[in-house]
């Protein structure tokens, strides 16, 4: 998992921020929003600019983070019968979504209200949100035999909260780039969210607000910041840090409410006084940053067998949820008691990793691209500036 050569040899500089289709972060993409494939020239070279390649570090980080997301969902039904599974669940939930959100913020730094970028945001984030929110609601109604399940675009169900959150965060990017102290302001907003139970469930605003500092932090980061955490000394220091975090999580497994890690409730809704919300928001932010830095330190910087899967993490994220929910609706964990034994827990972990890996592969992405990355040229007016850029590139 080492991402650097030993004895202080420095990695190549990390890329500047780029945007993928719909505003979903991808390490390298051209101005049209189509992600450039590793080892091939991007369409930007037709406009007289040198071809760019995806950066392996960020693709690796996204893939490993999405594998941890799937594992966390697989461990959830095991928490009542296994303290170890609960500890791992709490440990992973401390940093896996913060890591993904920080990367999303980092690759949002160039976002503005340019029409072509707004179109990509709509087609790559808002449209999938609508489609999967409807699909998940219908799936629950059918698989769980729940005719009362309503289809509401204002109440994200299960995994779709991330899409609407990403849409809101991305739309506010110009504001964060404009103000002088974006991270302290974002932290203050998160704290206010954690002590305001009247916010309600519309658009899962509690999560939007409480995860906001990680997105804003990503906006403020530069390539050299990632180089700092990828040093050999940080990789070594990450070992005792994670060991301590694991021991602490095992101790806290029976003493702490794991709902804090979801960032979806105010302190009062968790049965705590309001001031605990302030303390927990700041404490969890600090813990998440430390563990996220350790996670980044261990992410390989070179091309691995799974590097290309980093381009399909949103596919894996949204599609694996149907299997996770099916396991609960059909009682698979109850039907196989062995899954609650140590060997079964390991098996569940492996299955979750394999499942989300398959869902990130190119064949799956080709099948579902019409939903995840729809072109929808018919829905938008022609952008004169973009047309001029394309004509200029053709003449060049």
Image (spheres, helix red, strand yellow):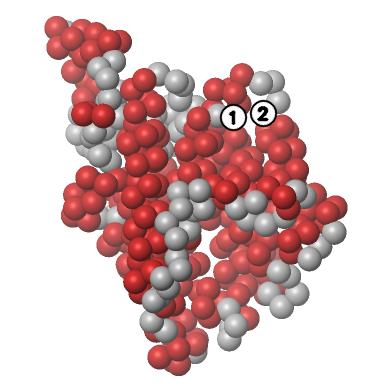
Q: What whole-number distance in Å separates the C-alpha atoms at marks 1 and 2?
A: 8 Å
Where's residue 229, x and y in %? 57, 43
> Which residue is rendered at x = 24% and y = 33% of the image?
376
Q: For residue 220, which numbered disc appears in the image?
A: 1
Q: Is residue 227 left or right of residue 361?
A: right
Judged from this view, the residue extending furthest toward the front is 148
Q: Quadrant of residue 395?
A: top left
Could you classify mark 2 by the number of other residues whose Cα lies within 10 Å: few (under 14), some (14-19), or many (20 or more)? Answer: some
Q: Which labelled disc corresponds to residue 160?
A: none
> Is residue 281 something that shows in the picture?
no
**Label number found at residue 182:** 2
Q: Nearer the viewer, residue 272 or 102?
A: 272
Residue 203: give x, y in percent of width and height: 54, 47
Q: Residues within 10 Å of mark 1 (few under 14, many from 20)?
A: some
Tell me the quarter of the image containing the N terminus. bottom left
- The quadrant of the image that shows the C terminus is top left
Please give the name of the residue rendered at 45% of the width and 25% of the height, measured from the top-left corner: 111
Q: Nearer the viewer, residue 100 or 158?
A: 158
Q: Compared to 169, does 130 lie above or below?
A: below
Camera-side residue of 296 and 255: 255
Asked if residue 354 lies left or right of residue 6, the reply is left
Of labels 1 and 2, the one closer to you:
2
Q: Earlier in the sequence, mark 1 or mark 2?
A: 2
Side of 64 where 279 appears, left or right: right
Query: In this orientation, which residue lies closer to the viewer: 196 or 246?
Result: 196
Residue in the image at 33% along x and 50% along y: 131
Tell me if residue 387 can be seen: yes
User: Going 40% across and 47% down the picture, which residue do you hit?
Assistant: 129
Spot occupied by residue 345 in the image (x, y as percentages of width and height)? 47, 81
Q: Disc 2 on helix, strand or loop?
A: helix
């Amino acid at each position: 998992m080492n991402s650097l050569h030993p004895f202080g040899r420095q990695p190549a500089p990390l890329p500047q921020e780029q945007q993928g289709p719909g505003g979903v972060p991808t390490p390298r993409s051209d101005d049209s929003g189509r992600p450039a494939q590793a080892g091939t020239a991007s369409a930007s070279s037709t406009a007289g600019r040198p071809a760019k390649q995806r950066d392996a570090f960020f693709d690796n980080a996204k893939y490993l983070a999405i594998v941890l997301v799937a594992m966390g969902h697989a461990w959830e039904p095991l928490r009542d019968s296994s303290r170890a599974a609960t500890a791992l669940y709490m440990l992973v939930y401390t940093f896996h979504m913060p890591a993904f959100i920080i990367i999303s913020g980092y690759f949002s730094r160039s976002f503005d209200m340019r029409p072509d970028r707004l179109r990509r945001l709509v087609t790559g984030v808002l449209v999938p949100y609508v489609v999967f929110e409807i699909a998940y609601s219908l799936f629950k109604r059918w698989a769980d035999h729940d005719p009362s399940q309503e289809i509401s675009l204002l109440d994200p169900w299960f995994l779709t909260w991330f899409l609407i959150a990403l849409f809101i965060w991305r739309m506010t990017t110009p504001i964060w780039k404009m103000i002088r102290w974006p991270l302290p302001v974002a932290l203050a907003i998160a704290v206010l969210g954690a002590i305001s139970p009247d916010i309600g469930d519309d658009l899962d605003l509690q999560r939007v607000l409480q995860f906001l500092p990680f997105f804003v932090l990503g906006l403020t980061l530069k390539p050299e910041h990632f180089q700092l955490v990828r040093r050999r000394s940080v990789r070594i220091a990450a070992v005792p840090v994670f060991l301590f975090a694991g021991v602490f999580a095992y101790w806290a497994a029976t003493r702490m409410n794991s709902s804090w890690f979801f960032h979806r409730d105010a302190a009062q809704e968790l049965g705590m006084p309001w001031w605990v919300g302030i303390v927990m928001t700041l404490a969890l932010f600090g813990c998440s940053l430390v563990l996220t830095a350790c996670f980044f330190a261990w992410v390989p910087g070179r091309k691995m067998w799974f590097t290309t899967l980093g381009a399909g993490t949103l596919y894996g994220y949204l599609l694996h949820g149907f299997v996770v929910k099916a396991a609960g609706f059909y009682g698979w964990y109850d039907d196989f008691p062995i899954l609650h034994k140590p060997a079964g827990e390991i098996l569940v972990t492996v299955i979750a990793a394999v499942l989300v890996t398959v869902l990130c592969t190119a064949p799956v992405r080709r099948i579902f691209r019409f939903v995840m990355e729809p072109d929808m040229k018919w829905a938008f007016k022609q952008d004169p500036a973009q047309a001029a850029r394309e004509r200029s590139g053709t003449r060049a």
